[in-house]
Amino acid sequence: QQKVQQSPESLSVPEGGMASFNCTSSDRNFQYFWWYRQHSGEGPKALMSIFSDGDKKEGRFTAHLNKASLHVSLHIRDSQPSDSALYFCAASEHNYAQGLTFGLGTRVSVFP
Amino acid sequence: EAAVTQSPRNKVTVTGGNVTLSCRQTNSHNYMYWYRQDTGHGLRLIHYSYGAGNLQIGDVPDGYKATRTTQEDFFLLLELASPSQTSLYFCASSGLNTEVFFGKGTRLTVV
C-alpha cells in the first residue's frame, strides 16, 4: 500500500485560477512533508516544506498541514501556464530530507 | 543553483547486460541518492549514501549495486540488467537540513 497518497491524479485549471490538491500519509511516523514539482523532461524540484500545523505561504503557493490527520494540501493561486507540471508530495519521519517517501503525483494542466 | 549532473541521459542495453549510471554533484553535499521513477509507482529510493565509501539500502534495492567513490561521485550499477529495470533514473543530493536537488535523469531501456 502506498504510504503517501495524493489526490486527484490530475486536474485542469484555467489560467489565473486556483489549483488545489491533497496528500495524506497512512504512516503516523511521517510527520514532515515536502512538495516537489516536476516539469516534463526535468528532475523534480523542491517547492516548499511544511512541518507545523497550519498554513505556510511562499509567493503564489500555500501549503496547509493538519498533523492530527496527516493531511497536507497545496494551493496555487493565479495559476500560470508554467505551473503545468507533475506535483509530488513527499514525507519523512525526520525534519531533514534523507529517505523521503514520495506519492504518485498530481498532474496539473493550466489552460488559457 | 545546486548542480547534479547525470550521464548518460539515455541508454539502451540488452537483457543480461552490464550498465553503469554516473552522477556528479558540485554542491558539497554529503548525501546522495538514486531514485527510479515509473508510472504508477512514483519515485522510489534505490540506494543512498552519507559520504565517500558509505552506502545505505533504500526501498527497492534488488538488482542494483551502488558505489560512492568521492563526495562528488555516485554510481549505480546494474550487473545483469532485466526488462523490469527499464525506467527513468534520478540522482539527487542534499545537505543535512537542505532540500534534495535532483539531476535531469537517465532514461534506461532494457530490451
Image: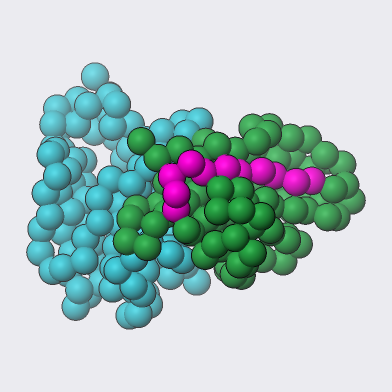
Chain colours: A cyan, B green
Q: Residue B24: within the magenta?
A: yes
Residue under the point 56% across and 48% down: B72
Q: Is residue B74 visible?
A: yes
Q: Which quadrant of the structure image shows residue B22? A: top right
Residue under the point 27% across and 24% down: A81
Q: Which quadrant of the structure image shows residue A54? A: bottom left
* Dominant secondary structure, magenta: strand
- Where does the image place residue A80, in percent across and percent down from the top left? 22, 26
Residue under the point 82% across and 51% down: B81
Residue under the point 77% across and 53% down: B78
Per the rendered image, the range of residues in magenta is B19-29
Q: Is residue A55 left or right of residue B95?
A: left
Q: Residue A19: within the magenta?
A: no
- Quadrant housing the C terminus of chain B: top right
Establish if B20 lies above or below A108: below
Q: Residue furthest top?
A: A112
- Quadrant housing the N terminus of chain B: top left
Q: Is residue A42 left or right of residue B48?
A: left
Q: Is residue A15 left or right of residue B111?
A: left
Q: Is residue B46 visible?
A: no
- Where does the image place residue B105, in percent across and percent down from the top left? 57, 39
- Where does the image place residue B5, in percent across and percent down from the top left? 55, 37
Q: Residue furthest right?
A: B16
Q: Toward the viewer: A17 or B96?
A: B96
Q: Toward the viewer: A89 or A7?
A: A89
Q: Toward the viewer: B69 or A23?
A: B69
